[in-house]
Amino acid sequence: MSATPGAGPGEALTAALTAATEDRVVYDLAGIGRSHDALLAELPGVRVRFAMKACPVDEVIAVLARRGAGIDAASPGEMAQALRAGVPVERVHYGNTVKSDRDIAEAYRLGVRTFATDSVQDVAALAVHAPGARVFCRVATGGAGALWGLSDKFGCPPDDAVRVLERARELGLTPAGLSVHVGSQQMTGEAWRTALDDLGDVLRALSGRGIRVDHVNLGGGLPARGYRDRRGNPLDPPLDKIFAVIREGMDDLRRVHGGPLDFVVEPGRHLVADHGAIRAHVARLAERRGADGVRRHWLYLSCGKFNGLYEMDALQYRLVFPGHPDGPHVPAVVAGPTCDSDDAYSHEEGLVPVPKALASGDPVWVLSCGAYAAGYTTVGFNGFAPLPYACAGRAERTGADG
């Protein structure tokens, strides 16, 4: 985590955080809507399927649905929530390649007709429990350049993707598309270029087998802007380059395909991370000598890895201390409130400058944590409950409600 004296969120979040007297996650729905519109301006005509695992909050889903977005769902539970929030079922696809017979059947019962796949075993199950469904095959990527590579559990090599879709056709399914995922918080344009080149190879091979898909799913991976790396340096994703590579790759794939080809994208953190923040408080600023003999300050917050900041082991969030705009700072290890050693940011990576005058109870704003703060949380580890959430200008709701 990184404290940035004077830095702050947008106007709507600032007002909501200032008004908050208790801990909560706050989302700026208008800001999320603007992120959606800006994405479509960069990638005109692309269909958005929000990766709702990044922010499974009804109000967020609803504001995106009103703009025409759909949902990339990983389970029937996510599908049911999306439908309740107002997403039309034809805009929901089952994007998880890992699914049981029971979950396939339940998704089909809910009306979902488009499924991701990456193995002939999954295709066989889909043919039984989702007869006639549309399937798109996920092509594996290396994940280089991303904070989370996602390179092992999902996807198959290009040659196998051809065999998977051939088998889907044989079993009465519709081989409808291809997909990739270049890794979460992808920081390079090169990763997209490599993935798009692989998709072109698969399209050529499919054409030789008489299979013509109707869409390519570009997956997730589009980065958020507001994070810091583990040493506290701002992450500066080259979004202009990334979008240029994607647009060029889409044009290339259309030429390879030789006919109409739709595109889908599955943004998660790119839409919501920078439009959410946590109002937390200081549990204690303490000074302790470690086993190595070095004295360090430790800033213990009321939220941590198990209740809102799960990703703190891979990145830092910006911290704002509204009650201490000035004054001396000290370098500190930042940690959560639980009795668990993993609930801390490693001091081997980098210490965080925090106001020396901090006292227990002082408010802290944790910025750019609109992604995964609600989803990656325990039901009450060590008795620390999930944070309630609120949308700027709206009433508070508990985490369990969302």
Image (cartoon, grey):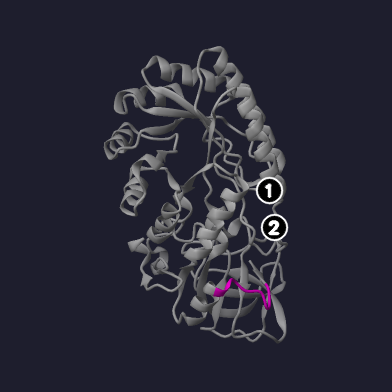
- Counting other residues with Cα less than 10 Å from the Cα at mark 1, is it few (<14), some (14-19), or many (20 or more)? many
Residue 155 location, x and y as percent?
A: 53, 31
Q: Which residue is mark 1?
A: 187
Residue 156 location, x and y as percent?
A: 54, 27
Name the disc covering residue 333, or none. Answer: none
Residue 197's image quarter? top right
Name the disc covering residue 235, or none. Answer: 2
Query: Which residues fall within the magenta stretch?
Result: 4-11
Res. 34 in view: yes
Quick one: label 1 or label 2, which is nearer the N terminus? 1
Which quadrant would the N terminus be assigned to in this image?
Answer: bottom right
Look at the picture and state if 13 lies above or below 349. Answer: below
- Tell me the element at label 1: loop
- Counting other residues with Cα less than 10 Å from the Cα at mark 2, is it few (<14), some (14-19), or many (20 or more)? some
Which amino acid type is marked by label 2? Leu
Mark pair 1, 2: CA separation: 8 Å
Instruction: Report the side of 229 relative to 40 (left or right).
Output: right
Which amino acid type is marked by label 1? Met
Instruction: Report the side of 57 relative to 314 (left or right).
Output: left
Which secondary structure type mostly characterizes the magenta part of the structure?
loop
Outermost residue on the left side: it is 109
Look at the picture and state if 212 lies above or below 183. Answer: above
Res. 369 in view: no
Nearer to me, 371 or 249: 249
- Could you tell me if the residues under marks 1 and 2 are in contact, i.e. CB atoms within 8 Å? yes
Asked whether residue 368 is drawn in magenta, I would say no
Residue 176 location, x and y as percent?
A: 46, 26
Residue 377's image quarter? bottom left
